Amino acid sequence: MKIAVFYNIAFSGAKRVVLEHVKGLKLLGHNVDIYTTDQANDIFDPGTEANNKYLYNFSPIEFKLPVFNRFKKDFIDTFYTLKNVHKKIARDIDKRNYNIVLVHTDISTQTPYLLRYLKTKNVYFCLEPLRNAYEYSLRLKDNVFVLNIFYENLNRWIRKNIDRKNARSADHVLALSLFGRERIIAAYDLYPKISYLGVDESVFKPSNAKKKNQVFFVAEKYPIYGYDLAQQAMKLLPKKIRPDLEIINWKKNNSERLSDEELVKLYSESLVTLSLSRFDTFGLVPLESMACGVPVIALNVAGYRETMVNGKNGFLVDFDPKEIADKIIYLLENSKKCEEMGRNGRKWIEEKWTWKSQIENLEKLLVAFSKEK
């Protein structure tokens, strides 16, 4: 097939997904072209794997007045200029006779405007609905200045409607988990099929790195990612056996990103990985850790329930620092069980969660969608 792929995502696990989609579909023999406004050339650049990359300019001019800049960014750049850029992209895609368009997220609007204007058959790979429009935890706080409240609520209301209209314009929608599908149903009244994510088991694999007395936490230091739970759990561990908490956010410093090889080393050196995000629609970290033969302690919520087998390749726990601490202690005191869980995790990845198997499933869905009249 001839496939167009659109995305505009900052460096993240989500951008890795686009790269893996492009790489995997191309390996299966398809012609894959990238369309994007993303100017970054990082290690997850999907354009490095595509047959062709079409880059469109969306670089609004910055002014010195912060208040005016915010208004311009929201109401002129995002709600008007970006829409016209996406119209142009849609026209270019339509004239090149693709079998189907795989549309990923746009960081400016979540669901891209592109879906409104495409005439070519298309499918939206929905990571999640626009979070600050639906999640109570991301609401404005009561101590915000009243004019800021008015502006932000108006802005979020407009963005919510844009996100919903764009999503409902898609010919088809894919969710990356059962939990993600439930959120899409609630937000859009759409009923997507599932296209799971995966991990490259040839890269993320057990290594000979020497084990350290450390627990691994891969996320920013914010409560939404469970950093507070990790801190509290570690404090509950007896000092004489307390491991170090190794924390990374995918960056070595402000400008240089960790390579996969460096990540594999950090996973492999650790006794266990903590995945404590309160609202992770899927979560690549548990897959990467299990692929490296390292058990995972994850919250019993959201996408973790679909990738983890409680008691076999790690533990699913409640929002309880003591329970998390108890599971860490159990793994510290039962090294053979810890190793067994690591082996189980690796086997689980090889059986179900490789990118190869997930891309083959994605291909079947895209072929079926492209043949529909």
Image: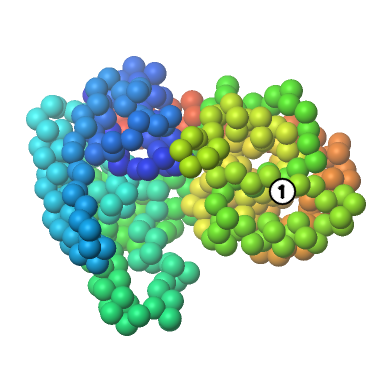
Q: In this picture, is 332 found above or below 256?
A: below
Q: Residue at x 52, y 53 (%)?
A: 280
Q: Quadrant of the N terminus?
A: top left
Q: Residue at x 40, y 53 (%)?
A: 128
Q: Residue at x 76, y 43 (%)?
A: 214
Q: Which of these two is toward me, 10 or 99?
A: 10
Question: Is 134 on the left-hand or right-hand side of 203?
Answer: left
Residue 237: image x %, image y %? 82, 57
Q: In this picture, is 97 found above or below 107?
A: above
Residue 92: image x %, image y %? 12, 33
Name the amino acid, label 1.
Answer: Leu
Q: Which of these two is toward me, 171 or 166?
A: 166
Asked if one can make out residue 303 in the rendered structure from this viewpoint, the answer is: no
Asked if one can make out residue 76 in the rendered structure from this viewpoint, the answer is: yes
Q: In which quadrant of the rendered view does residue 14 lie?
A: top left
Residue 150: image x %, image y %? 28, 78
Question: Is 52 on the left-hand or right-hand side of 318?
Answer: left
Q: In which quadrant of the rendered view does residue 161 lie?
A: bottom left
What SS does tag 1 mark? strand
Residue 276: image x %, image y %? 62, 55
Residue tagged 1: 245
Q: In which quadrant of the rendered view does residue 168 lie?
A: bottom left
Q: Residue at x 24, y 67 (%)?
A: 67
CA neighbours of label 1 inside 10 A, class few (<14), some (14 to 19), many (20+): some
Q: How many marks?
A: 1
Question: Is 112 on the left-hand or right-hand side of 298?
Answer: left
Q: In this picture, is 63 found above or below 91?
A: below
Specify how the rendered protein is coloured. Answer: rainbow
Q: Quadrant of the C terminus?
A: top left
